[in-house]
């Protein structure tokens, strides 16, 4: 297929119905979930100071914008469905592209869908208490000493949300983008309202004075305990090295909260004027969310002392902050805001993710049925496959034992999977931006309507900085790093299977003349 045909979208059958506003809404809406309302507690515990908490979000924002601007060149060069899968395939080889797509299906995209759906149902439980993680429809069935499977009312609502949003997106791109635009607009306004409440309406002079009197000195920071026995624990207050390690470890939460900005590249086959609109929407969307996240954290610091942020109940920093202004109403207000946020976030992730599997199926590297479009010209089979696996990931539970009471409790399996795969996601980001350099050499004459800002220095800085974070995580968070690599590598035998099946199919096919 020629580049002109791909951009037109005619031979693919996809509808180019996403304008610049729609594309920007997908970028911003997929990024804003529940993380910004929660993860600042963990970052504050690790870093122990106001200045370093804000610096963590500034660095995350800079990382995200640099990566987005680098991806913009690749998106403008290859405006095809599948996005990052296509970039890795073209820069390296089909297997690396497949490993990314496989990991996306196994956990990156589907695990995030499951996690966001449960976050929605968890906060719905604030309004409707019968939606509970322990109100069983099917009580836990223990599968081993570490795992069980169950269906609580909370899990049931999460499954219903995934099924509902999948159904909506099988009805055509127009309906999916309406939902996305509506919910992204509402949650952006909600986050804006939180910022106004914190910075203007409820601002507490004594809290501001306490938080900003000494910006950079870590106080009561938690020790970072390495998973490798030959390394010593470090703490942010113990000098430059300890601060560096704590800062790198803290990036996991803020980076995860800012993730999914690349989802718009998956839908490139449906974006109008993609060579212009995808790079522009990446810049606008990531810039908007970065500003909102930084301002939201400033709002927290105007309402809550840093120690209160560190120890917010269940890490619900936003709820604790709003409660200082609307006493007795903060829990309800933030529950509604997070329900809106997670519903819109999941719509964007569901809409975009299926396009990766559609592109893989086109390359005969996924289930053949996934390469088809339904009557609404969307990849319905890919959407359904994504839905089924995402719903399944809601059901397994990890078995936990309360240290104080000895009572057994249950966690969520996808939570562990997402911890594991954050490391792998960062690897794929680094590889993709290195791919930018490779493609500049492999295809110097390719059409590049947009070129990465600051190339080669700015993308190079991202590669070096992200690699340093990866090294720290591998050394200090080994237990949640190496399993991510294992998840990725499970795709190697699957790739061999699919390519071998493709070769057998080709060998057994009749000659072209006989087919005609």
Image: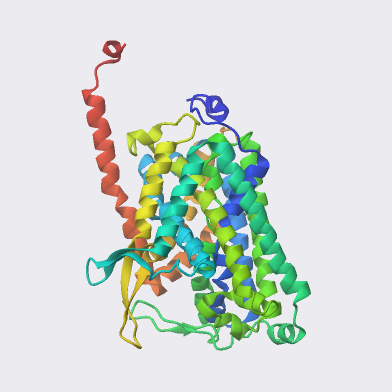
Question: For this view, does 136 lie left or right of residue 454?
Answer: left
Q: Nearer the viewer, residue 306 or 129?
A: 129
Question: How far from the left and from the top, in percent, is residue 211?
Answer: 68, 83
Q: Is residue 346 visible?
A: yes
Q: Is residue 459 visible?
A: no
Question: For this view, does 26 lie left or right of residue 471?
Answer: right
Which residue is found at the position 63% from the left and 72% from the top? 55
Q: Nearer the viewer, residue 268 or 196?
A: 196
Question: How far from the left and from the top, in percent, is residue 416?
Answer: 37, 66
Question: For this view, does 427 lie left or right of residue 227?
Answer: right
* Colour mapping used in the image: rainbow
Vertical arrangement, residue 210 with respect to residue 154, above or below: below
Question: How far from the left and from the top, in percent, is residue 339?
Answer: 56, 61
Vertical arrangement, residue 369 with respect to residue 308, above or below: above
Which residue is found at the position 60% from the left and 34% from the top? 17
Which residue is found at the position 50% from the left and 31% from the top? 376
Question: How far from the left and from the top, in percent, is residue 257?
Answer: 54, 63
| Number of residue marks | 0
């Amino acid at each position: 297929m020629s580049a002109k045909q791909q951009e037109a979208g005619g031979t693919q059958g996809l509808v180019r119905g996403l304008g610049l506003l729609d594309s920007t809404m997908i970028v911003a809406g997929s990024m804003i979930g529940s993380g910004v309302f929660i993860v600042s507690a963990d970052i504050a515990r690790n870093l122990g100071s106001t200045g370093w908490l804000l610096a963590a979000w500034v660095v995350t924002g800079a990382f995200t914008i640099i990566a987005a601007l680098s991806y913009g060149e690749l998106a403008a060069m290859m405006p095809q469905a599948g996005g990052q899968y296509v970039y890795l395939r073209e820069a390296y080889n089909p297997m690396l592209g497949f490993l990314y797509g496989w990991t996306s299906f196994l956990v990156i995209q589907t695990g995030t869908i499951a996690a966001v759906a449960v976050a929605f149902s968890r906060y719905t439980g604030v309004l409707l208490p019968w939606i509970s993680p322990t109100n069983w429809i099917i009580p836990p069935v223990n599968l081993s000493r570490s795992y069980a499977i169950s269906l609580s009312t909370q899990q049931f609502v999460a499954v219903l949300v995934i099924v509902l949003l999948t159904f909506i997106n099988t009805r055509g791109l127009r309906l999916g983008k309406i939902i996305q635009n509506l919910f992204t607009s509402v949650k952006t306004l909600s986050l804006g309202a939180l910022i106004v409440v914190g910075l203007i309406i409820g601002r507490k002079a004594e809290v501001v004075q306490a938080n900003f009197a000494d910006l950079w000195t870590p106080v009561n920071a938690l020790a970072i305990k390495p998973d490798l026995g030959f390394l010593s624990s470090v703490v942010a207050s113990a000098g430059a090295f300890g601060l560096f390690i704590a800062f790198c470890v803290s990036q996991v939460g803020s980076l995860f909260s800012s993730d999914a900005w690349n989802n718009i590249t998956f839908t490139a086959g449906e974006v109008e004027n993609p060579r212009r609109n995808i790079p522009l929407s990446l810049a606008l969307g990531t810039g908007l969310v970065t500003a909102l996240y930084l301002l939201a954290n400033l709002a927290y610091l105007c309402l809550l002392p840093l120690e209160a942020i560190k120890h917010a109940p269940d890490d619900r920093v936003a709820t604790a902050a709003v409660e200082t202004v609307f006493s007795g109403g903060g829990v309800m207000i933030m529950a509604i805001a997070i329900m809106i946020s997670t519903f819109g976030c999941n719509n964007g992730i569901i809409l975009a993710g299926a396009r990766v599997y559609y592109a893989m199926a086109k390359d005969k590297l996924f289930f053949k049925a996934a390469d088809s479009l339904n009557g609404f010209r969307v990849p319905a089979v890919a959407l359904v496959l994504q839905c089924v696996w995402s719903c399944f990931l809601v059901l397994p539970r990890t078995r936990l034992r309360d240290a104080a009471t000895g009572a057994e409790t249950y966690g969520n399996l996808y939570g562990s999977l997402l911890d594991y795969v954050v490391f792998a996601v960062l690897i794929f980001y680094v590889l993709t931006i290195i791919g930018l350099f490779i493609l500049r050499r492999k295809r110097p004459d390719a059409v590049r309507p947009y070129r990465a800002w600051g190339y080669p220095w700015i993308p190079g800085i991202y590669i070096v900085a992200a690699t340093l974070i990866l090294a720290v995580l591998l050394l200090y968070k080994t237990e949640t790093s190496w399993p991510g690599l294992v998840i990725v590598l499970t795709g190697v035998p699957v790739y061999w299977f699919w390519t071998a099946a493709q070769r057998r199919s080709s060998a057994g096919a009749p000659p072209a003349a006989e087919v005609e």
